[in-house]
Image (tube, grey):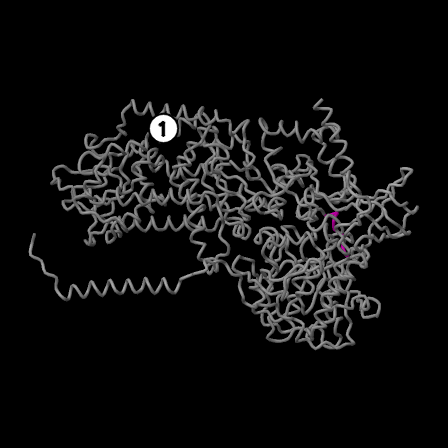
Amino acid sequence: MTDHTVTRREFLKRGTGAVIVAGAAAAGGYLLYDPEGDAGLYHPSEADLRLRNYFADIDWPASNPRISIATGGEDRIDQMVKAAVGGLDPSQGIGRLIGKKDVVLIKPNVGFDRAPRLGATTNPEVLRWVIRLCKEAGAEKIVVADNPIEAPDACFAKSRTREVAQAEGARVILPSKIHFETLVIRDRQPDPQNREALGRWPIFHRPLVEATKVIGLAPIKDHNLCSASMNMKNWYGLLGGRRNQFHQAIHDIVSDLGMMMSPTLVIADGTRVMMKNGPTGGRASDVKAGGEIGRPTIVASVDQVACDAWCYQHLLGRDPAKLAYLDLAKKKIGEQIAQGTKRFGESNWKEYQTQGKIVTTKV
Amino acid sequence: MANTHPRKGKVKVTRFRDTWLNSLRITTIRIVVQAVIFGLFLSFILLTTFANLDRLPGLKAWVSKILEVDPLVAIATAITTHTVYKGLLWSLVILIPTLFLGRFFCNWVCPYGTLHQFVGWLFRKLKPRDTIEINRYYKFQHVKFYVLTAMLIAAVFGTLQIGLLDPICLIYRSFTGAIIPAANMPAQEIFGDYKLHQGAWLIGFVIFGLVAMNLMIPRFFCRVLCPLGALLGVLSRFAWWRIERDPDKCTDCDLCLMNCEGASDPHTQLRMSECFVCFNCIEDCPEDALSFAFLPPKEHEVPHTDIPRRRAVLAAIIGVLFFPFVRASGRSTRDFSAGMIRPPGSVEELEFLERCIKCDQCIRVCPTNVLQPALFEGGLEGLWTPIMNFRMGHCQLNCTACGQVCPTGAIQRVSVEEKLGIGDYVDQGPIILGTAHFDTGRCLPYSKNIPCVVCEEVCPTSPKAIHAEREMRIVRDGKKMVVSSTENTLQLSEWPEPGQKVGTPALFNINQWQGDETTKYFVSVKHQDGLTETRRIAGNDVDTLKIDGRFARQPEVGTAVIIQLEFKIPRIDTSLCIGCGICEKECPVVGDRRAVYVTAEGETRSQHYRQPDRNRSLRLMKIASSGTGASSRSGSSACGTGGGCGSKGVEHKIDLRKFLA
């Protein structure tokens, strides 16, 4: 054994160290203590993110038409887009809807990896002229986004959406996991008995963050489940999560989408209408230019329900009274309006069909 | 990197003494070259994405270039296939200079070697004495020659395994399978979603383990395991230039071993098969005794590999036995796995195993993440070869990117027209990857009476291979008895089972049977005389059904009625299915297995093993019903959706029964 003394300094150093670590461990244990054993379980986000109402800022004269139709040809898409949108407001045209400083989200349907001629995606030429129209109206920034079923890169390439959008100076946002946020679509749990589908749901939110105006730009297509994929079904591309589970109640979800999104404007692309084998198509014979009208058609409207009804009847040649999601959307939007939400008033789509609020232009 | 000596400006390589380069050290030049080539490797692999190839089609000639210059890939595939596939001729760019300069590839070109050298330089800190000892030549460096021998002998029999350890394949695979996704995970904000790969942990741990070995033995992989290094080492025996020691100047200080990368004994007779031509020894020699000399005296070198002949024979025997051992498991022939579906344009399985070098470039470029590195789905032979997992993604219809980047033709460079059987390829039909099947016990409409048919929605063929038929089903406890009736209402009681009281009132939820657009409820009445009438139910209260329309004859009290539902049930027309797997990917039954799934049944590429089997099971239906096999595809595509195909399906079944009898 050797003679050994501990210095006071050494004793204090070690003692202080031990006390600090013991104190930290005790404090940490106290702060993180979970007596019930469930504090660490997953709790859904309580954040109250909601979609904005993109029609709320619009001052829309009651005398304006609800639906504006332009028919023409593949070589005159520029004039058709201008005529269709311009027809909605004879005095100000697009300026009524889009102003300076607006950030516009254009939502085409880029759901599939298909060439434009197959009609499964929005005609890129229509997209081009819609972007130009927004720029003419003074929009500060234009964003083009969709959440396709197939690989986003391939869909945006094959449909030529990216090429056209970028050539026109719009920003393209492809979906990525981190671009989704859980939004409150409905304050309560959806009630399937009441034909409701969405409560809180992950939404492709990134392109919506800075958008002040939203334009839906949907091709008109046959659909194996809900009979037609048009303006309201187009908002499906904003959903994330396991969105395919809704196909068990397709009319509920499509009408919920109509309720969820209050767009500034919808433009139906009836240049290449998919008449059968939808929504994927795949053969040129599945597609008919202008559908039952027979001439390439573009329909602009501030009333997506009425616009869907019109397109269903005149482009696809089917009976809108039998399309269940129209009436469901009418009911749901009607409830919103009753609660004081400013919507265009899509609940009255049947009346617009008959009240002469439709203008038609031939280009 | 390895050369950390602070001496400046002193160039001892005779060749460069009189040039402008004399202010530069040759090791500095080497480090720059290594960095540039590593940068190229990194750029190529990062650029290997569908979006980039779509934007810049010229890229596809470049992204696999470093694999194409690998002489082991060229030689081994030449052994298995007796051909040199397209870009593999580029390997001469490495092979020919090696014959003159030795294994310069290992320390000037190989990105994997650069990675090892860099990690060793960064983390390995040994005492100088220990460093010199570990950099001497050891007999365990023979192992790489045994690895090379066994792999090449196995290749003679037709199983290509060089990809397991070839450094270029290994680094490509590791970056694709583990490193890029790992780097991408925290950087999603910038680069978007990261890909998932089955067995990524294994690929990651293999490269981590091999690289970490540098802390104990410098360049462990390169010295001991690398089959490409072994091949280049064998070729080095003919080299015209090599490191030469001047015994008159040498003081035997062994400082040349301080930074010797290859452990090639420059302090005595140089082992030509081990020298990486890194020039560190020349830099380190304080006596100017070393130089890179042209055809120096033969007695100063060990030109051959010096492996014991009996061990070489044993290695060859391992190679000989490997083939029957793996083939005898039958995984690539009769007992093929249901999950082994190869990418579009893949050659037949046995030929695939002759060509695939497991570099996983196809997996890197795949836009949907469907391509996955196999574990043992294809047997031991197929480890890390590409297979499709339709839970991860699906085969994108208009994409053939995997074949475009494949350096060895395991996946052929098919065009989109050829893949889809359009344009010039109409007669040939589309490339079939497999066939979709329903697991009817899991499928929502089949077994759970829940409407769905998402599979039909996403099916990309035209007409759709998956189509839906309306079907009537009796609902649970659907048999009731009429208590009273009007022309459009029916008051019902429970149908009395034996021993039950007659007249128990039926208890329904209000509007339970109203239905909607996708699910329609009907009530069928069987009149006393046997006539059956079926009407849609418009609504109900607790015990009374309201009928849409009216009965032709009012049902009598006591008549039996059944309540049925009608909705869409999906069906598959196998003559149209191409096995793209989007149905499986999008199927909402996601818990564990999907209700619709694809197997390699009937894949186009299989000439010897699988296709006859599909002919017996699935293809037979088509052949039997439409005459000849060749024209059957165009024949069946004339069949529209819905009813037409359904009636055809009945004919098919009858033919199959005939065949089985």
- Residue at 61% over, 36% down: B434
Judge by depth and name the residue closer to the eye, B23 or B312. Answer: B312
Chain part drawn in magenta: A284-290
The type of residue carrying mark 1 is: Thr
Residue extending furthest right? Answer: B553
Question: Is residue B415 rendered to the left or right of residue B487?
Answer: left
Judge by depth and name the residue closer to the eye, A231 or B501. Answer: B501
In this rendering, is residue A280 above or below B92? Answer: below
Image spot of residue B463 (x, y percent): 72, 43
Secondary structure under tag 1 reads helix
In this rendering, is residue B17 above or below A89? Answer: above
- Residue at 58% over, 56% down: A241
In which quarter of the view is residue A339 placed?
bottom right
To which chain does the residue with label 1 belong? B
Image spot of residue B311 (x, y percent): 30, 25
Image spot of residue B514 (x, y percent): 78, 54
Please name the residue that numbered disc 1 is placed on: B149
